[in-house]
Amino acid sequence: MPAKYVIDTRPVPHRFEPVTKSGVIAWEEGCLKCAVCVKTRCIYNVYAHRGLHPRQMIDSIDNECMNCFRCIQSCPKELIHKSISPEFKELGDEYWSPNIIARLWYQAETGKIPVSGAGYPGPFSGAGFDSMWTDMSEIVRPTRDGIHGREYISTAVDIGRKPVCLSVDEEGRWRGEGIRIMDIPLPIIMKVPSFGSITDETVKGWGAAAERLGTLLALPKDRLGPEMNGLSRSLIPFLDDGMGRVGDLSGDFPFVECTATDSTPDLSAINRKIRRDAMMIVRLPLTKGIEERAMEQVKAGAFVLHIAGSMKGTYLDDDTLTLKEGILAVHRRLVDANLRERVTVLASGGLAMAEHVAKAMICGADAVYVDFPLLIALECRMCRRCTKGLPCPVSIEEAPRDWVALRTINLLGAWHNQLLEVMGAMGIRDARRIRGEVGRAMFFEDLDENTFGTLGELKEGYELE
Amino acid sequence: MSSMNDDKFPEVRETPSRFKNPIGKYRLHRTPDCTACGKCVEICRHGVHVAKRGMVLIKNAYRCMGPDCPDPCHKACPEKALSLKRNQDFDALGDFRWTADLLASNWHMAEFGRVPAAGLEYRTGNSGGGFDKLRMVLPKAEPGSAPETNHQEVDLSLDLNRRNDGAHRVRIRLPFYGGGMSYGSVSIHTILSRVRAAKALGTFCCTGEGGFPDELEPYSDHMITQVATGLFGVREETIQRVKIVEFKYAQGAKPGLGGHLLGDKVTPSVARMREAVVGYPLFSPFPFHSVYSVEDHKKHVDWIKAMNPKALVSVKVSTPTDVDMVAVGSYYAGAHIIHLDGSYGGTGAAPEIAKKNIAMPIEYAVPKVHRFLREEGVRDKITVIASGGLRTPHDIAKIIALGADGVCIGTADLVALECVRCHNCESGRGCARGIATTDPELEGQVDQDWGSQRIINMYLAWTKELTRLLKRLGMKSVQDLVGRTDCLIHLDYMKTKF
C-alpha cells in the first residue's frame, strides 16, 4: 500500500485580533466590589487573560469569551452584558457570511476541523450546495480501523487524458493518444483569487503550500515571478490573454489553462513555446447552456474542462442557478453522450467550505478549485477595500511567505479531514468513487416537494397554528 | 403496565432560574423620577416590579412580555419613570433552530409549567424549513371559548411493544421519552434530573453509551440501556436490569462516524464505568464491527433476548437514503422500536460538517419510513420513534402527524436545565453551566431536585399543549394523530394565502 497521505498541521497564530460574533460589555459604574467578583470565577479565565492587543489597541476579551453567560447572569448589579458585534455582522456578504469566514479563520489557525456540541444551529436548507445532504451508510464501513486508521481512505484523484480504451498497431506500438494523467492526493486545486491584497510573497507562500501538499496552484500568467521557477511542477498558469500569445512563459508546468474560444485550442503552439508537453485545461465560464459548450470542447479534443462559476457559486448570467446545477448539467450531458470517462471536469466559484468539495464531486466534478478561502486563511475579512484602492485592514501584503504557506496548509489539512469524515460516513474509501454518485446524496428539490408538496390545502373553517 | 396510568401526574412547582439574573427578552429602566406610588406593582400580573422598604424595584425583568403586555406599566406610570427596551443579552442568544424565543419559552415552561402567555414565540424556530414551515391545521376555535386544559381528557399514552411476542408490555404515559446522554458526556446530576423526571411522568430515559451508573439502579424500571458500538459499560447485569435495550447503530448528529469522548472528560469515575484508562480519549467506532446485514443484526437482537428474554429491543439508526429499508430490516430482525435519529439534533460533540450535511432531516425520514412500513403491512407491529431536532410540543405533534408514534427528547431537557447552547460542551472541562461535564466543581451547579422539577415542569407544559391541540382536532388519543398529514400544512406549498 502506498504511503498514507497525511497533512501535518500545527497551530499558526493570527497576526491580528479576529472579529468575533459577540462582545462583552462590562460597566464599572455601580460596581459593588464584591469580595468574590464573578469575573474571577470565569472557568475560561477570560478576565485573567484579558489584554490589550499592542498593534490594534483593542481589548482581547471578546476573542476569549466562550459565551457561557455565567458572569452576565451572576453579577449582582447586572453590570456585564453581551451583544452581537456590528463589525462581525458586517464581515463579508450574504454568500461569504460572517460564520463561514470565522470558521475558515479557525481552521487556518488550528488546522483542526470545527467540532461543537449541542446539535446543528443553522437553517434547514439553502441555495446551491446547502440544498443537498450526503448519504451515510448504516452498516458498511470504509476501512477496518476507522477513518484515521492505518488502512486509509484515499482522497487522490486523476486529472488528464483518459481514453476509454488503448490501441496498439500491428507492431505493438501505441496508437493514438494514450493515457496521460496526473494524480493529486487531494481533490483540491488552489487558485489565486481574483482580488486581494496579494503580493509576490503571498503567491510564493501559496506555491510552497501547493508543493508541500502535492497539489497545484492555478495562477494568472503575470503572477509568475522568476522565483517561482522551482515550483513550476506545482503550477497551472492561466493564459487570460488568449492562446496565441504565450509570451515568455517557460517552465515545467503539468498543465496550462485558457478560456475556451470558438476555435479549437491549439495546444501544440503553446507546447512548442514552453518546450514541454503540458496538458491543456479549457476554462468554460459558467453560463446557461454550459453543457452544450462542454460537449463542443470535448468533441474538439479537450479532455480537461474547468467550469468557472461566479465567486458566489452561481452562473455568471443568472444568479438563481448555482454551480451545483452547472456541474450536474455538464456531468449528465457527458454521461448521456458516453464521453464522461474520457474527460476530467474541474469546477470553481464559491467553494467556501469543505462540504462544498464533497458535494461538487457528488454532483459530478472530479476535483475543484479553491480561491477565496486561501485569502481568508490569511485573515481576509472579504471587505473588498483592496478593490477600491484602500489599505487592507489585516495587511495581507505584509504576510511572510512561510506564514502564508502554513496557514494554507492548516486550512486544507482541515478540509482533507472533513472530506474523510464525509467519505467515511458514506462508506466510500476512494475519492474517485464519489464523483457523480448522486444516488448517495439527497436533494432538497426531490425530498421537500415529495414529502410536503401535498400538504397545502387549507379548507374553509380551518385555521393554522 | 396499566398501573402507570392510574397515577396522577406530578404537580407543577415553580422552579426559578439558578442564576441571579435570568435572561428575558426585554429590559425595563426606572429613572429617579419614580415616586414609588406602586402603580406598576399593582398592574403587572407577572411580578416584574416589587415594593420593598418604601421603594419600588424591578425584580423580575425577565418575565416582562414587552409590547404584548395588555397593561403596560411604562404607559401607566404617572411619572413616566419607566421605559421598555429589548435586552441586548437576549439578542446575543440563540440560533436559527433554537431561537432566543424558543430558549426563553422553554425556560419559562421549566419554571412555571405552562407555555408563555405572550411575548415569546414558543411553537416554531427560524430555520426556514421542515418543522418551522409546517403548521397544524385546526378547526377554527369558537370565539370566546378557551377552556382550561386538563391532561387527563386526552390519552397521550403510547404502547411500545406491538409485537405481542411475550416481551414486556410497556406503556408510557406521554408520547416521548428521554434520549441517550451518556455518563461522561453529561454529569450524574443531569442524568438523575432527567431520570427522576421520567419516573415521575411515567416514561423512560436512556443511559446513552457509557454504562449504567449504580445511582440509577433504583430507576431501572424507567431506564433504557444502550448498547453502542464501543460496548462501553455494557454488562450482562445491566442488560438484565432494564425493560428496554437500545442498540445504537448510528446517531443523527454524526451519522456514520461513531462517538468520541475527549480525554479530558474521562475522569476516574467515567473510566471505571467504561472500563477504560483515565485521561485517554475513548472512541466508539462506527459501525458495529459484528454487523454487516439484517441477518447479523438479528444475531444481535437474539443475543439481548438470550440475556433478557422479556426486554424490548429498540434500534437507533440515523437517516440515510435507504432509511426505509433499514427500518423494515430492523422489524424483521425482531426489533420492537425503530428509533430514527435525524441529522439536525444531538447533544454530543460532533464535527460541524457532519451535523449540517450528513443524512437527511427527520421531517423527511419519518413519512418515508411510515409509508414503507405500511406498504409492507407491518406498520402496526413496530413503534416508530423520531428524534433529532424536536424542540417543542408543536414539533412533536407535527412529527406524529407525519407518521411517528412518539419522539425522543434530548436538547430540550438540557435547555430546561438552563443550557444556553453555547456549543462548548466538548471543550476543556466541559460545560461552564455544569450540565454537560463531569468536572466535580462544575457539575455541582446543578441540583437534582431543582433539575428534575424543571424537566417535569417543562414536560407538563408540553403535555397540556399537546392535549389542547388534540382536543381542538377532536381527537381522544394521540395515536389518532399518527400519519394524519391532513392535519398539517407546509407554508411553501399552501394554496389559500391569507
Image (cartoon, rainbow, N blue to C red):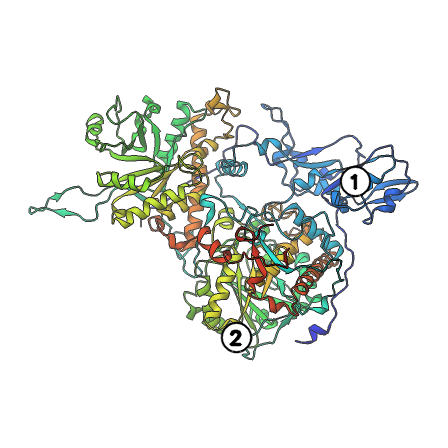
On screen, A247 above or below A413?
above
Residue at disc 2, secondary structure: helix
On screen, A410 above or below B17?
above
Query: Please, what is the three-letter code of the amino acid marked with disc 2?
Result: Lys
User: Count the marks: how many?
Assistant: 2
Distance (Cα) linking label 1 and label 2: 56 Å
Instruction: Find residue A122 and report its horizontal and vertical position in percent.
Output: 55, 46
Residue furthest left in the image: A171
**Location of mark 2 (residue):** B305
Question: Camera-side residue: B98 or B290?
Answer: B98
Residue A76's disc is: 1
* The C terminus of chain A, quarter of image: bottom right
Question: Camera-side residue: A380 or B284?
Answer: A380
Residue furthest front in the image: A460
Q: Image check: A99 left or right of A193?
A: right
Using a 10 Å C-alpha cutoff, classify the residue at mark 1 as few (fewer than 14 neighbours), some (14 to 19) or many (20 or more). some
Q: Is residue B370 visible?
A: yes
On screen, B424 above or below A95?
below
Instruction: Find residue A276 and report its horizontal and vertical position in percent.
Output: 21, 30
